Image (cartoon, rainbow, N blue to C red):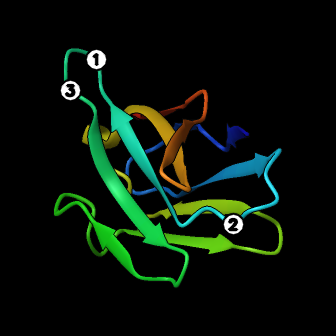
Amino acid sequence: VQLQASGGGLVQPGGSLRLSCAASGSTFLPNHMGWYRQAPGKQRELVAGISSGGSTNYADSVKGRVTIFRDNDRMTLYLQMDVLKPEDTAVYYCYAHIFGVEYWGQGTQVTVSS
């Protein structure tokens, strides 16, 4: 199973980005998917997660600014990020749980700066 993350980039504070994570190599739908991020010198932290049924959870720091959703037909996970702040700068990693096995994408850099 491979996860291909994309959509990162440089954006000004207050701007928006949409990250994508395409899963391939599995005929089974991931039962849980989500995004973590890691800023320089900090531990990796959960940003948001979503179950196969659509239940979501968010870090307090992004609630109200970030929306996680998935397209099960395309086996793709998304993270819509709005009102971005400099503290959102990090490498964002997607993950997927399939029958108890955890898979990770390669990470995509998000930089929020004027």
Distance from disc 3 to disc 2, alpha carbons, whole Å, reads: 29 Å
Image coords of residue 48 (percent x, y): 37, 60
Rendered residue at 32%/43% (across/down): 88
Tell me the residue that label 2 is attached to.
29
Residue at the spot of label 1? 40
Identify the element where label 2 is drawn.
loop
Sequence-wise, which precedes: disc 2 or disc 1? 2
* Amino acid type, residue under disc 1 in the picture: Pro
- Splitting the image into 4 quarters, where does residue 107 fall? top right
The residue sitting at 38% across, 76% down in the picture is 56
Instruction: Measuring from the top left, give residue 51's x and y in whole percent.
Output: 47, 73
Q: Mark 3 sits on what residue?
A: 43
Instruction: Give the quadrant of residue 64.
Output: bottom left
The image shows residue 35 at horizontal and vertical percentages of 44, 50
Question: Which three-letter amino acid code belongs to the residue tagged 3?
Answer: Gln
Give above or below for 16 relative to 107.
below
Q: Which amino acid does label 2 sit on?
A: Leu
